[in-house]
Amino acid sequence: MNEKNIIVGLDVGTTKVCTIVGLQHPNQELEIIGIGTHPSYGLKKGSVVNIDKTVRSIQSSLEEARLMAGVNISSATIGIAGSHIYSFNSSGVVAIKGKEITQDDVDRVLEAAKAVVIPSDRDILHVIPQEFRVDNTTGIKNPIGMCGVRLEAHVHIVTGSIPLIQNLVKCVEQTGIEAEHITLQPLASSEAVLSYEEKELGVVLVDIGGGTTDIAVWKDGSLIHSQIIPIGGNHFTNDLAVALKIPHNEAERIKINHGSVLAEQLNQSAHITVQGMSGTKPREIQLSLVAEVLGARAEELFDVVRIMIDDKKLLDAVAGGFVLTGGGALIKGMPELGEYILMRSCKIGFPIPFGGMTNIMQNPKYSTVLGLLLEAAKRKPYVHIHGQSQANHRVTLSKEKDTPESSHDLIGKLSESLKSVFKEIF
Ligand SMILES: Nc1ncnc2c1ncn2[C@@H]1O[C@H](COP(=O)(O)OP(=O)(O)OP(=O)(O)O)[C@@H](O)[C@H]1O
Ligand SMILES: [Mg+2]
């Protein structure tokens, strides 16, 4: 096996660390050959709070994936989230130098678009082109070769706190692998879950993880808004533990096996037996009480999403509705309650199968890591044994397929510059 064609997605989540190893074939296909998942103990709300515990969780997940794939892992594309992430839209304008727009003009206009003042403790993670305008023509995805005198770029910029990004990279690199690229988690989940048509029509991806809910809003094939909400599935579990005075693992078991956010979906008189805190006897509780507790938290979460969409005036833009993914989307009744509060269609988003994906992987909690693998595949072309590169279009779920090459390069360069900062510090 040519190890140059091994790519890896690594999702360091609040509840689990997941590694997927992919093998790229010369026929432009991507095959999943290794999977490793391990509970995550060192994160809170998407950010590292304990380096040693995080390193150990990553190590275990990498080891499992490495054993299954039978290959060495030297680098991975990693995801980032956490409430320190802040994104905004920006634009830039340049005069076109020659008769036709060249790569150099595109690079200059993207530089102009990201020339905004950001606090010194933040760094830019992504500059994602939304559209280009040449003179009075709007909605251009790739302006190279077009004629005009004025080039304008509209971009979505994602920034994060430098120390928090460094903590994540440090944890990954302490396991002996390189953090090759850093990708915003909802971008990765969108890659794995959303179709081209949904992104064109307008859709909101809502990735409900353990510690955070990550939002990505798409319209006309471009990312128009992204945001991290510090509420996730763990809050639902904690609410149950507090309300029913039961241990956290028992609350988690009840949420997964008997939970619903809609009391109407349950047999109102049904009861279940719950284990109390140590030293207390098991007792019977009404299922509708569980639904009441979980329903209150789900309502709060959907209200936050609705207010965010209203504030940004995006409701009319998202005719495709809301796609819920992440493990937290699996609580019974979530799409129905979401639809009621958000006033748009709401469904669960499962990863779109590829590369011999097993049934186990077709679970919303693996959307991010599968998206990270797809991102890694897009960035790393197939390499022949003798070292030649092939065109890099093997993945059909491409979100940036209309994006000019320069933007990939730019994002790559940004990650490179980010890495050099880390290297200087560590
Ligand atoms: N079948 C299920 N029913 C209900 N909830 C579930 C189910 N499976 C997982 N969950 C919940 O999903 C959450 C974990 O989701 P996920 O694995 O997507 O999070 P994560 O990636 O570890 O965290 P984050 O993205 O916030 O860093 C947990 O709160 C867990 O209880
Ligand atoms: Mg996650």
Image (cartoon, helix red, strand yellow):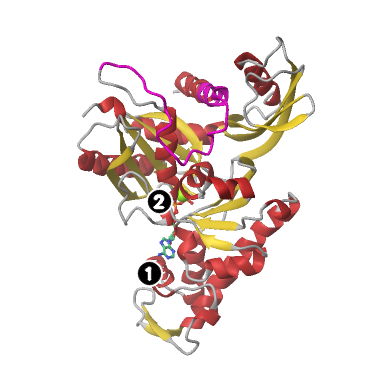
How would you rate the neighbour count of disc 2 (Cα within 10 Å): few for under 14, some for 14-19, many for 20 or more?
many
Earlier-in-chain disc, 1 versus 2: 1
Instruction: Residue at 77% x, 16% y: name it.
Output: 149
Magenta stretch holds residue 409 = yes
Percent coordinates x, y for residue 214 in the rendering: 55, 49
Q: Report x, y in % for residue 277.
A: 38, 74
Q: Does the residue labelled 2 lie within 8 Å of ligand 1?
A: yes
Which residue is at the front of the view, 344 or 267? Answer: 344
Closer to us: 136 or 111: 136
Whether the magenta-drawn stretch holds residue 166 is answered as no
Assign a secondary structure to mark 2: helix
> Relative to the observer, which residue lies in front, 78 or 166?
78
Q: What's the residue type where badge 1 is placed?
A: Arg
Image location (x, y in percent) of residue 237:
47, 65
Secondary structure of the residue carrying tag 1 is: helix
Locate residue 108: give its quadrant: top right
- Answer whether labels 1 and 2 touch (C-beta < 8 Å): no
Highlighted range, magenta: 386-413
Residue at screen point 35% across, 73% down: 278
* Along the line of sight, the residue nearer the viewer: 112 or 318: 318
How far is the residue under mark 1 from the one under mark 2? 20 Å
Task: Indicate whether 186 appears above or below 156.
Answer: below
Name which residue lies at 63% across and 15% down.
Answer: 102
Quarter in which the C terminus is drawn: top left
Instruction: Look at the magenta stretch and give its main secondary structure.
Output: loop
Residue 312: % across, % down = 73, 49
Q: What residue did someone put label 1 on?
A: 253
Drawn side of residue 385 relative to residue 174, left or right: left
- The residue carrying mark 2 is 366
Can you tell which quarter of the image residue 403 is in?
top right
Mark toward the viewer: 1 or 2: 2
- Image-based side of 369 in relation to 290, left or right: left
